[in-house]
Each structure stands twice: as C-alpha cells, then as structure tokens.
Amino acid sequence: MKVRFAPSPTGFLHVGNARVALANWLHARRHGGTFVLRLDDTDVERSKPEFAQGIEEDLRWLGLDWDESFRQSDRTERYAAAAEALKAKGLLYPCLESEEELNYKREQRRKQGRAPIYDRGALKMTPDQLQRAIANGKQPYYRFKLNHRTVAWRDGVLGERSVKLPSLSDPVLVRADGTFLYTFTSVVDDLETGITDIIRGEDHVTNTGIQLDILEALSSLNGTGRPNRIRFAHLPLLTDESGGPLSKRLGSVSLRNFRRDGIEAPALVGYLAALGTSHDPAAAPPAELARDYDLSRVSHSTARFDTKQLLALNRRHLHGLDYAAVRDRLPEGADEVFWLAIRGNLDLLPEAKDWLETARGTITVPEQPEERDLLHAALDALPPEPWNTATFPAWTAAVGAATGRKGKALFLPLRRALTGEDHGPDLKTFLPLIGRDRVAERLRRSVAATQATAP
C-alpha cells in the first residue's frame, strides 16, 4: 500500500486538509503502507516557500511523519515526456480559442438546450492552420480527448460511483505557457510513484473519473503501472456548525490559528479521526488511533465540524494531562502544584497564564458593598501560615460560624474577593498558591471598596 497527501503550497493548512492528511496517514500506518508527502506546486504564481514550510510544520505538529516527499516542480521533465506521448497518439490536442470565444460557445449551447461543454472545435483545425496561427503569435493550450464512456469504481467510503465522461468538457492539461495543470501532473505522479490508494475529498469525484481515463491512456502508452489496482476513497466534505460549507478561506479553521489559540494536537487529531463516524472522539496521538482506523466507518453524509465539540474534547484532554506533558509550555514560575490546581478549569492551555497572574500577581477587586461584614469577618479569621489543602475548609468554617453564612452565600463573595471571578479552581488547592499576604491584601482592598461605595 502506498498513499499520498498532495497539498498545494498556496496557503496554510485548514481542517479540511488536515482531515485528508490524517485519513491517509492512519490508513497507511494501519496497513503497514507508505505515506508520501507530495507538494503540488505547479501553480508557480501562488506557490510560496513559506507555505510549503508551514505545511510541513503543521503536519509535524499533528504528529504526522512521511516516508517519502517530493515537489512537482522538480518533475517537469517527466510531465513533458508524458504530454508528448499523449500528443503522439492524438489524445492531447492543441486549442486556440480564447476565454471570450469559449464563453460565447457555452452560451450558445445553453440557448440550444445543450450542456455547455467544449465542442471539440479545435479538432477540426488542420496542421497548416495551427502552424499559421503559431507563426502569427498565438500559443496553443492542450486538452485531453476523453473517451465516450462511463468510468465506474467502488469507492472506499461512498460505495459504487461513476462519472459519465461524455457529459464533461475535455480537460485542459497544458496551459499556453507550457505549464501543466494539477489534473495531469497528479496522474503522472500517481502512476510513476506506484500509488495504490487515493484518499481525498468528495469534491474530487468528477476529477477521479477524468483522471482514471488519463491514467489508463498513459498506462497503455508506456506499459507502467496497473491503474485498475488504484483504489479511491472520497471523504464527504465538512460543514460548519450551521450546516453551511466550511470555507477554506476562514482563518478560524486554519491549523495555524488552532495552534495559536491553544488547541492541543491530540484533541484535534482525535476529533478529525472520528468526524463523520458513529464513534465518540477521543484525544490521542495518531499512532494510537491507527491501530483500528477504518475508512468504511465514515458516513456517506457530510460531517459537521463543530468548534464547541472540539473545545469540549480539548478541555477533557487538558484535564487529564500530567505536569511533565505541559511543563515546557507553561508560563515561567508555574510548578506542578500550580498545574494540578488549575488544569481542571482550563479550556485552552494559554489560560494557565491568567490563573498564574491571579495566584501571584495583582487582580482587580470587585466591589461588593453588601458583603462588608462577611469580608471583615474573613479578614479577622484569617489563619497564620503555613497553609495547605485543609486551610480553606477550616477558615470558611470559622467565617461561617461568625456570620451565619453557608453555601454559595459564604463561598461566592470570598471567591470574588480573592480571584475576581465567580468560578475557578477549587480554593482548597488554590488558596495556598495565593498565600496569606496576598489574601489579606485583597480582603483589605475589597473591604475598602465596599466601604467607599456603601450608602
């Protein structure tokens, strides 16, 4: 088995790309296959080195490695040779129509009630006409002559699929400037590098029909490869939370933004691996998920990418991490005691910095004029250090006895005065992190605030 992930380095990876990369990697690793990273950089104007580097960085962040890698820009001689072989057999033919002429033809066909596909008008051009046009400065582009047949295959996800080639325009494979299009270069690479399984998005189903036709044409010419052995699997496209198309251009679904915001790679990997299946997602590294990954479990229906579900999975993952797993990514001064105290209240790891500031920095004390008696009593009952997890229960018991308060009426005003928040880590473990001096100072400031605002 040999699979490939073939992104175009014209931008950074988004979750749709990541899902395809992950599916290929998991499928290959489960079956002992080879995973190839191929950069489809034939779009010279839009392909950028920084995007190529970013793609590799994002894949490594996810935990994906590759056994082979290459760039299509290093294989132009192979594409040129394949193109010449198709030309020699009359399967790749020159065209001269401009975009305006093609638009006119399409419009005329629509008016006649016919499909607006290319009419193969260029095939009527004689060699002499072509040469005169070239002598006059025109440069031809080349289309592949599709067979008049229906291409069918059993898809690894979608089941039986077919594409009626007569309903499609002959695809342009070579531009007028001599550069090659993805539709062609992908086939040449898949054939020559021995790809056995192609896993990609459902938006490529029509491309698959076309590329199978090109693949068989090339195989018959050079005798390499056996295209009937290539298996295809098309993953249904992702939608957003509202069921609309998940735009590739939304920065919110780029891997770079998820990394910046603090989403953990195992959470994203686990979520994407389970997306579209009946299995509950579990945060895990790819190698752990590969053992029982099965493409046949993926539904034929579109899958909804819900950032709230991802965030919930990320939260559960963080809550179970030990200190060693996060030590290098915590803010300076955050030790194991701090981590164990706050991890249960994190949605995203960067929030740890806020809790470290709450424990050891300066916070804004909220005004609670109605709580001045309680705050005075809390200050008076503040026990001496050293403090441990027994300090908070003992202290609040004393405050409760002095004020008659209990439950939320006792604990919430104290939490607000000590942390500035209504919710947060268990104060049994968090109070010792703040320390007696800071607690006393915050209570005094809170009391002063209540007195200043009292009627």
Image: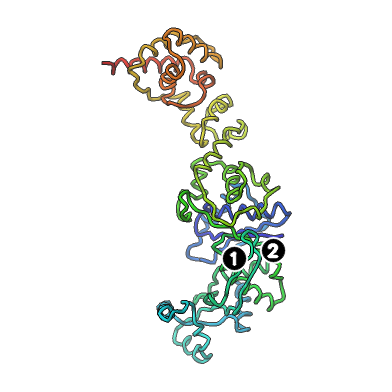
Residue most extreme to the right: 32
Of labels 2 and 1, earlier in sequence is 1
The kind of residue tagged 1 is Gln
Residue 317 image position (x, y, % from top left): 58, 37
Q: Nearer the viewer, mark 2 or mark 1?
A: 2
Image x and y of residue 123, in percent: 53, 86
In the image, taking residue 95 as reference, residue 6 lies left or right, namely right
Question: In the rendered view, would you say 83 is above or below 290?
Answer: below
Q: Quadrant of the C terminus?
A: top left
Residue 420: percent from the left, percent from the top? 41, 24
Cα distance between the residues tagged 2 and 1: 19 Å
Front-most of residues 404 and 388: 404
Front-most of residues 62 and 397: 397
Residue that appears at 55% across and 25% down: 341
Label number found at residue 72: 1
Q: Amino acid at mark 2?
A: Thr
Residue 42 picture quarter: bottom right
The numbered disc on residue 196 is: 2
Secondary structure, mark 1, is helix
Judged from this view, the residue extending furthest toward the left is 455
Q: Tell me the crowding category of disc 2: few under 14, some 14 to 19, or many 20 or more residues within 10 angstroms, Cα based.
A: many
Q: Secondary structure at mark 2?
A: loop
Q: How is the image coloured?
A: rainbow
Q: Which quarter of the rendering shows the N terminus?
A: bottom right
Pointers 2 and 1 in contact (C-beta within 8 Å): no
Left or right of 90: which side holds 12?
left
Considering only vertical position in the picture, is 86 above or below 455? below
Q: Quadrant of residue 327?
A: top right
Q: Residues within 10 Å of mark 1 (few under 14, many from 20)?
A: some
The residue sitting at 59% across, 69% down in the picture is 185
